[in-house]
Image (cartoon, helix red, strand yellow):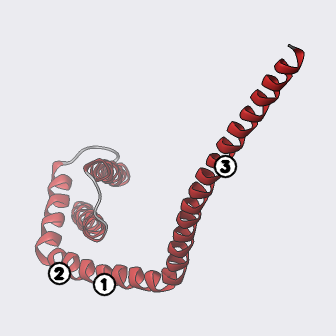
Amino acid sequence: MEEGQFWLYSMLLGCALAFVYDCLRIFRRVFSHGIFWISAEDLAYWAFAAGCFFRLLYYESDGVLRWFAVLGAALGMLFYRRTVSPFWVKYMSALLRLVRRGTERALRVIAGPFAAAGRFAAGQAAGGARRGKRAMRIFKKRLTVWAKLARMVLCKRKALRGRKDG
């Protein structure tokens, strides 16, 4: 009787682990990301799966590896993948994509006035910068003219003083 119960637990664990991996697959379909994060997710999943399987073996068979438990988990995964998994992944991914798109649209509507205000402010700042550059050019030209005039006046005064002295 205990062996049958252990076999059932290992099959249920296989189904549960396949379900968790399907949730990970759904997440990847809804939110695409790079190979680094996919690898990190897989590593975390397999560490979780190993921990769950170790816990099953520890509590049910005193830590002794029984190959029929591994076979039971594999059959549980296979059963889940052949029956529930295709529908679960397909329809849950579609539903979550719809929710994500709806949320993105709602956020765009909410953020629209703020984005428009930001674009307006950026345009004004760019226009102000252009006007500021133009004003600085004009100021520089006027300053140059005043500097030249000052030099001319100083040179004439020096020249006039030189005549009076001589």
Give the image location of residue 24, x and y in percent: 29, 64
| Foreground tag (3 vs 2) | 3
Q: Residues within 10 Å of mark 2 (few under 14, many from 20)?
A: few
Give the distance between the C-alpha atoms of the residues marked 3 and 2, in whole angstroms: 77 Å
Q: Is residue 160 above or below residue 53?
A: above
Q: Nearer the viewer, residue 159 or 70?
A: 159
Q: Mark 1 sits on what residue? A: 98
Circle 2: residue type: Phe
Residue in the image at 54% along x and 60% along y = 130
- Of pointers 2 and 1, the one earlier in the residue sequence: 2
Q: Quadrant of the N terminus?
A: bottom left
Residue in the image at 34% along x and 81% along y = 101
Q: Mark 2 sits on what residue? A: 87
Give the image location of residue 12, x and y in percent: 26, 67
Q: Quadrant of the C terminus?
A: top right
Give the distance between the C-alpha atoms of the residues marked 2 and 1, in whole angstroms: 17 Å
Circle 3: residue type: Arg
Q: Mark 3 sits on what residue? A: 142
